[in-house]
Image (tube, rainbow, N blue to C red):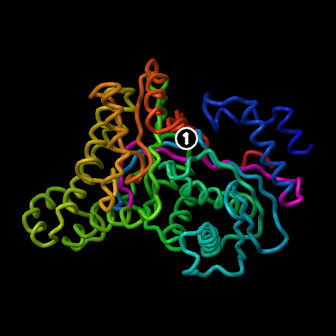
Amino acid sequence: MARTEMIQRGLLHAQYQSLYGNSYQAEDMDKRFISLVEAHTKLFKEQDVSLFSTAGRSELGGNHTDHNLGKVIAATINLDTIAAVSKRDDNTVVLASEGYPEVIVHLDELEIIEAEKNTTEALVRGIAFAFKQRGLAIGGWQANTTSRVLKGSGLSSSAAVEVLCGTIFNHLYNKNALSPVDLAIIGKFSENNYFGKPSGLMDQMACAYGGIIGIDFADEENPKIEPVQYSFSEHGYQLVIVDTGGNHADLTPEYAAVPKEMREVAAHFGAKHLREIDETTFASQLPLLRKTLQNDRALLRSIHFFEENKRVTNMLKALENQNIEAYLKEVRSSGESSFCFLQNLYPSCFPQEQGLSLAIAMTKMLLGSETTVRVHGGGFAGTIQAYIPLDKYVFYKQEMEAVFSKGSVTPITVRQRESCCIAE
């Protein structure tokens, strides 16, 4: 049966709820996948395709803690990148992402190419290298993708692409030998070493795994995963992301400064990461640290790290106990800490643009000072996250979009499914 005919007959419908929760229209999704397959046939003259889906993620807590072996809580969400994929006879990967130039990577050349950094080519090459380094098979494939993971939104569009590419190698050539955790570690390796961005592991982990998970990175190569089943809508809240329109271009130095400054504090104690330092010991050394480092921001960011780890533990416990009020209290505290101590709501080099701060202020103006709202993701530009009472969602969306443009408010739900091949 042709892939398009299979979709038209509704044979993907059984997959949709695990991918998109209850917030989808089957007809809309059918059209989306049919268009994807038709585009593949047009691009590559190939009709025998497999379909893949990798979700974006939403950080719920643990802002900028993963890169120092901290704790986070994150959710895989209903916005995904989907791909139509077919094998190639040669040792080449061709990736055609909607709206972007075609990416071509020859797998005979897997060393780091300095001129290729900050490109998708670098990500693909690094992922292939990591598979080969583990003694796994790699081979050529061609894919076209379309995505609803908003670029620059803090929903991890780049991590979704990394995990998607890893999932394709894993499925086509290795019989799904690698776990979601393995795929996440490979994605981070590629982003750090080949792409050149010093990110932590949370983004890739949440994109790969599925559901709400607590992650403890104390052992970075074997992170501890704690899944939690919870529905915010069933408890009266719509989780939303508000895109303030900020641009992530040229912000890599701002992101890189966060782990760097935390590690400078750790280095004072002869350690590499803050997680290796006892908080009481840190507090006792504050007078000397301030004189030695001459960087108050590094101290404030370290204070955020220690407190944020405690908040993640409390958030997980609250969800497990079905205590939404206790959970939301911790989220609010996390948001305040990011604003005051982590200081990642706007770039220090351009304080005139403070879309995140404005969006948080507006949310509190519209819904009250006890509203649960926080910076989302890496920060400095991009998005905020808010928990909106269901009966106020339409009002909130209307008022926020009047300032931040139509479509800037996106409702999200938790996706239970890991990154996967959904049809072959």
Classify 260 as above or below 317: below
Q: Does 65 appear above or below 138?
A: above
Residue 74 in sight from this viewpoint: no
Residue at the (38%, 62%) spot, across then down: 255
Q: x%, y% of residue 190?
A: 55, 69
Instruction: Rate crowding at label 1 as few (under 14), some (14 to 19) or many (20 or more) other CA atoms within 10 Å.
Output: many
Q: Position of residue 158 (x, y in %)?
A: 56, 58
Q: Total number of numbered labels?
A: 1
Residue closer to the observer: 304 or 223: 304
Per the image, the residue denoted by label 1 is 77
Question: What residue do we see at 36% from left, 48% from top?
Answer: 62
| Percent position of residue 226, x then y | 44, 44
User: Magenta segment: does it hold 66?
Assistant: yes
Side of 238 relative to 146 (left or right): left
Residue shown at 36% from the left, 27% from the top: 324
Res. 323 image quadrant: top left
Query: Which region shows up in magenta?
Result: 43-67
Residue 16 visible in image: yes
Q: Secondary structure at mark 1?
A: strand
Q: Nearer the viewer, residue 61 or 148?
A: 148
Residue 111, position as x, y percentages in the image: 60, 81
Residue 69 magenta: no
**View extreme (right): residue:** 1
Q: Residue flagged by tag 1: what amino acid is it?
A: Ile
Q: Residue lying at the far top in this picture: please name it.
A: 391
In the rendered image, which quarter contains the N terminus?
top right
